[in-house]
Amino acid sequence: MRNYKREYKLFHSQPIQKKRRAGRNHARRIMLKLGKVRKYSASDVDHKNHNTLDNRLKNLRVVNKCKNRSMK
């Protein structure tokens, strides 16, 4: 059984993880503003170079959730 409180305390609350999460959220908002994705759509915003803090337009692309989350 997963201990979500412990997991947040040890990993998700770390400053670097907060910045990475904020970068992913910002990328999503950018694509929403441009009209590339919609709220609750089955698409993810992918960072081509896997750096979530790099939100340049040429680094962002819209991909299907299944495809984006299956990559290693």
Image: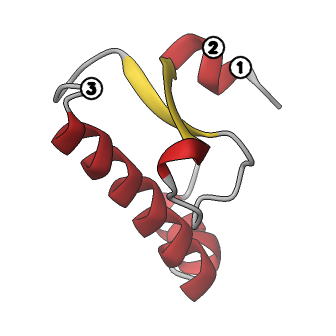
SS at circle 2: helix
64 w.r.t. 51: above or below? above
Q: Are marks 2 and 1 in contact (CB under 8 Å)?
A: yes
Nearer the N terminus, badge 3 or badge 1? Answer: 3
Q: Position of residue 10 (x, y in %)?
A: 64, 78
Residue that badge 3 annotates: 37
Q: In this view of the protein, can residue 41 be seen by the observer?
A: yes
Of the residues shown, which amino acid type is indicated by label 3?
Val
39 w.r.t. 63: above or below? below
Q: Position of residue 38 (x, y in %)?
A: 18, 25
Residue that badge 2 annotates: 67
Q: CA distance from mark 3 to mark 1?
A: 20 Å
Q: In this view of the protein, can residue 1 be seen by the observer?
A: no
Picture quadrant where residue 71 is located: top right
Of all residues shown, which one is farthest toward the bottom? 15
Disc nearest the viewer among 3 and 2: 3
Of all residues shown, which one is farthest toward the front? 58
